[in-house]
Structures are given as C-alpha cells and as structure tokens.
Image (tube, rainbow, N blue to C red):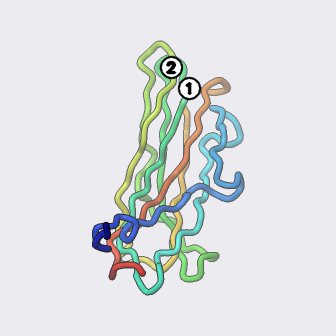
Amino acid sequence: MSSFPLNEVGAFIKSYDGNAGANAGAPSLITAGGGLDNLKVNGQNVNRLNGTALAHSAVAATSYLAALGAAETLSLAHEIQESANGSSYDTAEVIQAATVVATDSGAGSNMRGVSEHDVSLRARKQHFRINVTPNMSRANTDTCTFHTLITLGGWTQVPQ
C-alpha cells in the first residue's frame, strides 16, 4: 500500500533538541538558590533551512518536573535569539517574561507540565535559538529539571 507523500507528517515537521550543549542535551538538575537557579540556559542552534525549504513557524515546548515545598513556585522565562551564521547571535527578544508555571498546593509535591509557545519565524534570520531561565521561589531544597523541544513547521515548500 502506498501513501500520498503530502499525508506524511514527517515531511512537514522537523524537531530539535533545544537544550544547550553544556550538558550534551540531557536535562540538568537545578536546586533552588543554587548556581543554576535563575540562570539563563542558552539553547542549541536551530537551522530553519531544510534543503530549499524555509520554516516560517515553530513551537517551543519546555517540559518540566519540579519538587516543590509547600506553597512554593517554579517560574520560566523564554527568549529568542537569531543568527545569520549559527554562531554569532543578535540581542535576545522576550517570548515570555518570567511566569509562574507551577505552584505547590500547600503540602509539598512533584509538579510537572509543559510551557508551550508559538514562535513566528517569518522575519527571522536562518538560524535561531530559544533560551530558558528557570527560577524557583524557595532556597536550598526545591529542585527541578526541564527540557525544551523545538518543532518547525509552516514550510515555504514541501521539504525534500
């Protein structure tokens, strides 16, 4: 049985590991009040060009798991940087300012979720990256991990 190529989602969607190379793409464990808390993590370079097709949109989805104390919070901030060559990036632009994405109900628990953002790439350069800043309200005991996945779409033509 053959399938019509335009029905294949893989021809229209391309995903990237958005985390920085400092930890080889694996999520870091961040401890509240520690050296990585409230510290921006620069994302991986994403090339919008696939053959001769250029992606005009993306979804940046940051999944997180946080162990929070009673009534404590996790906030995430997202920003985008663009580049003509994939190595020298322009000044970052805010996608989402620091926003509380998880609040413990009062007993202390594990909180999980996804912070998802639609990103228009129409007026962007060929390369971009998404940077994420996690921030926990408590010091010393709360922890979190997060990982960003970037999915490209809105191609100028069907990628070959």
Disc 1 secondary structure class: strand
> Could you tell me which residue is drawn at 45 percent across and 22 percent down?
104
Please say if 156 is above or below 154. Answer: below
Which numbered disc flags the more N-terminal residue, 2 or 1? Answer: 1
User: Is label 2 in contact with label 1 (beta carbons under 8 Å)?
Assistant: yes
- Classify the position of the C terminus by image quarter: bottom left
- Classify the position of the N terminus by image quarter: bottom left
Please say if 131 is above or below 57. Answer: above
Residue located beneath label 2 in the image: 109
Which quadrant would residue 142 be assigned to in this image? Answer: top right
Count of marks, rendered view: 2
Q: Nearer the viewer, residue 107 or 114?
A: 114
Side (left or right) of 100 relative to 144: left
Amino acid identity at mark 2:
Ser
Q: Nearer the viewer, residue 5 or 111?
A: 5
Dot 1: few (<14), some (14–19), or many (≥20) neighbours within 10 Å?
many
- Image coords of residue 65 (percent x, y): 53, 34
- Image coords of residue 123 (percent x, y): 37, 78
- Could you say which disc has been placed on residue 67 in the image? 1
- Image coords of residue 133 (percent x, y): 55, 48
Q: CA distance from mark 2 to mark 1?
A: 6 Å
> Could you tell me which residue is drawn at 30 percent across and 69 percent down?
3
Amino acid identity at mark 1:
Ala
Please say if 51 is above or below 82. Answer: below
> Could you tell me which residue is drawn at 71 percent across and 41 percent down?
35
